[in-house]
Amino acid sequence: MNTITLTAVVVSPGELKEISTDSKVRTIRLAHSLGKDKDSLFVDVEVFGGWAENFRGTKGDLVVIQGELRQSHYKTMDGEKRSRMYLRGKEIRLLEKRKDSQEESPSEEFNQAVS
C-alpha cells in the first residue's frame, strides 16, 4: 500500500458533492512548502463520507492528511490522453486556523466528529 502523510496549507476547501444517495465527496486543494526560496507543491485531495461532510478548514488553515496516491486517466475534447495524480484522503486533521481567522479553532470538534 502507498500511504502518504502530508502537512500542508488549505488553498481551497472545495465543495461538498453528493455522488450517490449515501455518499459524499469533497476535493480539497492543498499547498505544501518545499522550503525557503522554492516553489510549493500543490496537491488535490479527495475525501469521502464523514471526512468530507465535517471538514471545516478554510483557506490558509494548516492540515495534516494521510491517504493513498492515485492516478486517473481521461481524454480531452481534442482526443488527447491525459492523466492526473491526486491523493485519496483516508484521514484529515485540522492543525491550526490561519492567524487572521475570526473563528475559534474547530480542530478538536472536527477531529472528534469524524473519528
Image (cartoon, rainbow, N blue to C red):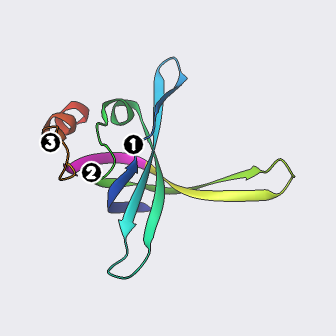
Spot occupied by residue 65 in the image (x, y as percentages of width and height): 33, 53
Q: Splitting the image into 4 quarters, where does residue 104 fall?
A: top left
Spot occupied by residue 77 in the image (x, y as percentages of width and height): 83, 47
Spot occupied by residue 59 in the image (x, y as percentages of width and height): 34, 48
Classify mark 1: helix, strand or loop. loop
The magenta span reads 89-96
Given the image, on which type of amino acid does mark 1 rest? Pro
Which of pointers 3 and 1 lies earlier in the amino acid sequence? 1
Which disc is residue 61 wearing?
2
Residue at image location 46% in from the left, 62% down from the top: 42
- Quickly name the residue at label 1: 13
For this orientation, the residue located farthest to the top is 21
Residue 57 part of the magenta segment: no
Real-space Cα separation, disc 2 to disc 1, in angstroms: 9 Å
**39, above or below 83, in the image:** below
Given the image, on which type of amino acid does mark 2 rest? Asp
